[in-house]
Image (cartoon, grey):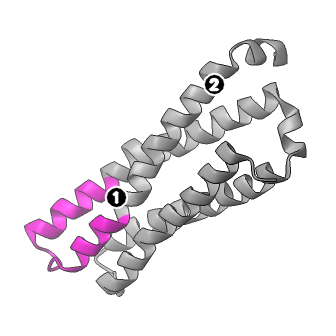
Amino acid sequence: MQEILSQHYDWLRALHIISIIAWMAGMLYLPRLFVYHTEAENGSNKSATFKTMEKRLLKVIMNPAMIAAWLFGGLMFWANPALMSEPWMHVKLLGVILMTGLHHAYGKWVKIFAADENVREAKFYRIMNEIPAGIMVVIVIMAVAEPF
């Protein structure tokens, strides 16, 4: 199996990158929806629209993209286990784990908004909107520049 994966490594890498792009699009957009949702009155049509948008973004785009990113990344490790000996890869994986944890926090917040139980202000979600971008910068630098 490792030989087959090695022969198709460029395809795995391409599918991994596509998955990450879709995942990051959602990670950057969902907290922005939360910002706007905090400004909508509970029970309003506007609030209902945000609930639908948030749920679909999470379930239809973000969750499958995250799973695909982990899957194709894992297959890349299987094809090239030597990657785990690289220090930069450990930093990258820490970033991916942090991103995954943030993804799960976003999922929890989608449920909180769906139940009209949000107590946080828009400023909190504006700050949370910046965190995935910072993590993404670290991950990309590690994967492309391999600084150490």
Coordinates of residue 108 in the picture (x, y in percent): 47, 68
Point out which mark residue 29 bears.
1
Mark 1 and mark 2: Cα distance apart in space: 26 Å
Coordinates of residue 113 in the picture (x, y in percent): 32, 72
Q: Residue at label 2?
A: 12
Q: Amino acid at mark 2?
A: Leu
- As drawn, is 122 to the left or to the right of 69? left
Outermost residue to the left: 45
- As drawn, is 16 to the left or to the right of 145? left
Residue 60 visible in the displayed image: yes
Coordinates of residue 57 in the picture (x, y in percent): 34, 50
Judged by its main secondary structure, the magenta piece is helix
The secondary element bearing badge 1 is classed as helix
- As drawn, is 74 to the left or to the right of 3? left
The secondary element bearing badge 2 is classed as helix
* Looking at the image, residue 100 lies above or below residue 105: above
Among the 4 quarters of the image, the one containing residue 73: top right
Coordinates of residue 134 in the picture (x, y in percent): 53, 65
Q: Which tag, 1 or 2, sits closer to the chain's start?
A: 2
Q: Are marks 1 and 2 in contact (CB under 8 Å)?
A: no
